[in-house]
Amino acid sequence: MPPWNYSNQNVLVVGGTSGINRGIAEAFAAAGARVAVASRQQEKVDHTVAALKELTTDVMGFCADVREPQALNSGVQSVHQAWGELDVVISGAAGNFPALATQMSANAFKSVVDIDLLGSFHVAQAAYPVLRKPGASLIHISAPQAHLAMIGQAHVCAAKAGVDMLTRTLALEWADQGIRVNGVLPGPIDDTEGMRRLAPLPEHRQAVIQSVPVGRLGAPADIARACLFLASEQAAFITGAVLPVDGGWSLGGAATIGAVLGESLKSSSDS
Ligand code: HXC
Ligand code: NAP
């Protein structure tokens, strides 16, 4: 029996069809919530919906690119029509690839900012009209790049720093409606697309493990537990916070990723 009870609550996880966000969707489903997931690829949506149906009774999915507000709005409306007001929205769609700032096109920089930052804004705008007032909770998925500069991550650093400020601003703007807005900042999470892109080789993974103060990589369940807490009544006085769930990595060790990327990106740009 999970410690949290989210039965009768409506949860939407944007970007919930793989990795960390899918782990979050599974945790809310295991806690009895109605869970909807959204992302771009129909196949990923279908697989996730099928897997979540093993955990809870009411599950939905829709396809939308967070860069396209119309598709997002109509997906959010379809969840609202089916289940009513949303209690929890997790906003975690993101894109990342390693590239030096001098070697990425303006469109490459823009595509990450558009997905992570503008996409989070679109999710917030689509969700706001159908959030339960009072009581709803919006949680953004941040990253160490939000406050730690990293070589090869200019686009992600700029975008995720913006996401954290969006979290704080919306927390202020929506507090009088009884809506809380927080962020969760994951450390390096094992077996995820993010880690595969930034630390692709076994030696990179090992270097990352050694740079985490608690001595291990995280799991999606570590991040999911923080979301279950932040969205709950237990966190009723918490808004505008960005909670690191990273084994202490963002205190400094996360710079290892920048060093690893710097070495490989600079040596390939010299050759
Ligand atoms: C340089 C690149 C590039 C690369 C793409 N581009 N990959 N530039 N190096 N490796 C450029 C393209 O040439 C293009 O610019 C522009 O970026 C847009 O590329 P598209 O492929 O057209 O974009 P799109 O199909 O919209 O895909 C978005 C994407 C893709 C971000 C590029 O990788 C994606 O969909 N990612 C989602 C999954 C993901 O990244 N998950 C990890 C999240 S982890 P031009 O000028 O040619 O048009 C994370 C934090 C991890 O966020 C932290 C770990 C510690
Ligand atoms: P992931 O598996 O690639 O998850 C990204 C999710 O977002 C997928 O469901 C993807 O599905 C969806 N998505 C991507 N672009 C989208 C778009 N334009 N519109 C709608 N959906 C989109 O990555 P992950 O590594 O688990 O990362 C998940 C979150 O955690 C991200 O916010 C990331 O920044 C953050 N994070 C990750 C780590 C880590 O160690 N992995 C560390 C810190 C922070 P589709 O392809 O179907 O769209």
Image (tube, grey):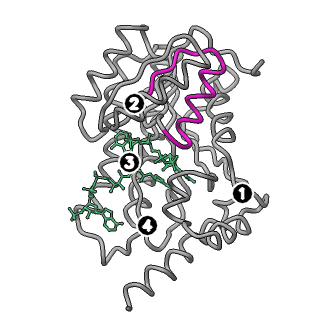
Kindly identify the amino acid type of the residue bearing the numbered disc 1.
Gly
What quarter of the picture does the N terminus occupy? top right
Mark 4 = which residue?
Answer: 153
**The magenta stretch spans which residues?**
18-38
Give the mark, 1 or 2, whose residue is nearer the N terminus: 2
Q: Secondary structure at mark 4?
A: loop
Q: Name the mark nearer the viewer: 2 or 3.
A: 2
Q: Name the mark nearer the viewer: 1 or 2.
A: 2
Residue 266 versus residue 85: which sits nearer the camera? Answer: 266
Q: Secondary structure at mark 1?
A: loop
Alpha-carbon span between mark 2 and mark 3: 15 Å
Residue 196 versus residue 230: which sits nearer the camera? Answer: 196
Q: Secondary structure at mark 2?
A: strand
Give the mark, 4 or 2, whose residue is nearer the N terminus: 2
What quarter of the picture does the C terminus occupy? bottom left
In the image, residue 244 sits, relative to residue 52, either above or below, namely: below
Mark 3 = which residue?
Answer: 116
Residue 72, how many percent across, how many down? Answer: 29, 29
User: Is disc 2 surrounded by few (<14), some (14 to 19) or many (20+) residues within 10 Å?
Assistant: many
Q: Name the mark nearer the viewer: 1 or 4.
A: 4
Kindly identify the amino acid type of the residue bearing the numbered disc 4.
Gln
Residue 189, how many percent across, how many down? Answer: 62, 52
Q: Residue at x 32, y 15 (%)?
A: 78
Mark 2 = which residue?
Answer: 38
Kindly identify the amino acid type of the residue bearing the numbered disc 3.
Asp
Count of marks placed on residues: 4
Residue 248, how many percent across, how many down? Answer: 71, 57
